[in-house]
Amino acid sequence: MTDRLEGREKVTGTARYAFEYPVRDAAYAAAVQASVGKGRVASVGAEAALRLPGVLAVLSCENPPELSDTSDGELALFQSRTVSYRGQFVAAVVAETLETAREAARLLRVEYAEEEAPDVGLRADHPGLYKPDKVNPVFPADTEQGEPEEAFAGSDVRVDAVYTTPAEHNNPMEPHATIARWNDDGSLTLYDSNQGASTVQSTIAKIFGLERGRVHVVSPHVGGGFGSKGTPRPNVVLAAMAARAAGRPVKFAVPRQQMFATTGYRTPTVQRVRLGAGGDGRLNAILHEVAEQTSTVKEFAEQTATPTRTLYRAPHRLTSHRVVPLDVPTPSWMRAPGETPGMFALETAMDELAVATGIDPVELRVRNDTDRDPESGLPFSSRNLVACLREGAERFGWAGRDPRPGARQEGRKLVGMGVASSTYPAYQSPNQATARAEPDGTFTVRIAAADIGTGARTALALIAAETLKEDLADIRMEIGDSSFPRASVAGGSGGTAGWGTAVVRACEALRGKLNGAVPPEGVEASADTGDELKARAAYARHAFGAQFAEVEVDADTGEVRVRRMLGVFAAGRIINPTTARSQFIGGMTMGVGMALMEQSVMDREFGDYLTRDLAQYHVPACADIRDVDAAWVEESDPHLNPMGAKGIGEIGIVGAAAAVGNAVHHATGIRVRDLPITPARLL
Ligand code: MOS
């Protein structure tokens, strides 16, 4: 139970975030967004802007800054006149002050030509839908086993329903921000808010034609990301371009209003789920077909139906993904991309099957558990879904639940309880780390890992202390800097597993080197886990969980309040209960937002999302989260990594929205298949 090491710095405001670095002589950038949904930039009138005192430079397709690599269309700023979506960055201004930059940006006259009505509507019958080569990161778009159509048609009990989830936007507290400085030797320093300094380093080096080591990314503290900072966004490129054009360091923070078009979001989905079962609830056929969107700039094909390949046993199965390139920003990662919308659909369908068969929803899931990964046939490294369901049911007081919908009424409030399963893969990437014994008896451990608010720094320090058999107080854990050994991103819930393995190996190597007094220059050891990962045996590695929710629905207004929520997870060994609990609860809270509030509303006529700040895009506030608790079952898994840890960053959100929705159905008898469950959908 260790508080986060940088907690005091964070709450006292001394922890420094990207935009706050006191860089000498810094200028400021402001960006201009396309005001048409599809077309070309005809001209950029900069006269008025350039006349404003303090304006240093204007960047646009009229004077495209040279880039060495333009393969990522979202990062190839100002290289083309094509407007691919409304809100795309089409120009930028650099000025002495932020206020001047913003005013000058307002004065730029961008004229458009060849304007066309943008196609921004995702539909399951969109003629542009196609089958991608793979879905993220490496999965087949489609899978099929047995005779799914026939088996479904011949099943005694059938559920066949379409579920939709809206676009949702990552809204970290700290918007994307970068300070770029070109140094006298031609190298580039970036103070940047990101989920992985090594990834920013290599991506930006390629774009600007630099050796990787010539880019230095500094990001010790990051105010959230939820996937949106997993890869560099246009802000990094823009800051570096602007700094080059102005001949000075440049600060650029994406205003929250601009984030909605430029820093990624969760694709909306239309999902058809068919479940065929016997009267005993045992699944005979599972079919899960997904339509989702990408942009015309690049393909992003989310892995929405992949959890359905893993969760339940059934001899006949089918999953498919189709994407359509629309005139929209490119979707990207948002906490448990794929699993989150996919499991809303599957786990709501399972609830519908429970109702159709009259089998308790917990029991139904237990009955369809499997000891082998159903599609790959691989054994699970460990799988404790049933333990989570049983323990959660026990703790939540599930046994007394009257299964009839609408049976429990307290005054004006209809009260119901719902459950859903949760799963997320236990990913792990190769990493490097160094561990150093200092002559004063302390230790310095370095890795370019990212702590985006998760507690990763603290978890890694605990891992180092345990491996070195030293006091935590004697460990200096240094992360968030691309000059440290290369690390994978804080993504895919693979951070602590991947980084932690490198830390363990470096610390073990250091212990092997230490004998007697440490010399004045210290003793250092390093590790690279690439070969270790290649040598791992084939197992299906996933975390599991069970989500329970109790809601009250106002019979007159349709307002839904989540009274209680409990998640029980099986995620391997929990390294630090304090920060792990916070991760789980944070994920569940985001799941409540998904269930009841979050939706990015597309302007069907002009393009771009209309919800552009936290007044319009609603996320849960403290008053919405009354009693949310997380617990975990002991899980010992020797097939993961030296810590025995699975990831915990994302599984908390998976299934949470379905649990809330299933509770709403239990309370009211109304099945809402389209998120979010707003009052209008209940009245
Ligand atoms: Mo997470 S959406 O994999 O950064």
Image (tube, grey):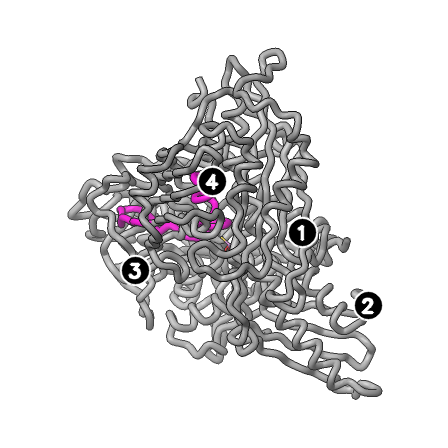
Q: Is residue 454 above or below residue 118?
A: below
- Marks 2 and 3 sit apart, C-alpha to C-alpha, by 50 Å
Foreground disc of the pair 2, 3: 3
- Corner quadrant of residue 93: bottom left
Label pair 2/4, CB-CB below 8 angstroms: no
The three-letter amino acid code for the residue at tag 2 is Asp
In the image, taking residue 655 as reference, residue 648 lies left or right, namely: right
Q: Nearer the viewer, residue 681 or 204?
A: 681
Distance from disc 2 to disc 4, alpha carbons, whole Å, reads 52 Å
| Residue underneath mark 1 | 580
The amino acid pointed to by label 1 is: Ala
Residue 301 inside the magenta-drawn segment: no
Query: Helix or strand or loop: what does disc 2 sit on?
Result: loop
The magenta span reads 320-347
Q: Residue at x 46, y 76 (%)?
A: 212
First in sequence: mark 2 or mark 4? 4
What label sits on residue 216 in the rendered view? none
Task: Note whether residue 250 is visible.
Answer: yes
Q: Nearer the viewer, residue 412 or 205?
A: 412
Label 1 vs 2, first from the N-terminus: 2
Q: Which residue is mark 2?
A: 471
Residue hosting label 4? 282
Whether residue 270 is visible, yes or no, is no
Mark 4 Cα within 10 Å, few/some/many (few <14, many 20+)? many
Label 3 or label 4, whichever lies nearer to me, is 4
Task: Give the alpha-carbon distance from disc 3 to disc 1, as whole Å.
Answer: 36 Å
Which of the marked residues, 2 or 3, is nearer the chain's N terminus? Answer: 3
Residue at the extreme left: 114
Residue on which disc 3 sits: 133
Decide: is 247 above or below 3.
below
The amino acid sitting under disc 4 is Arg
Residue 579 horizontal/vertical position (percent): 69, 51
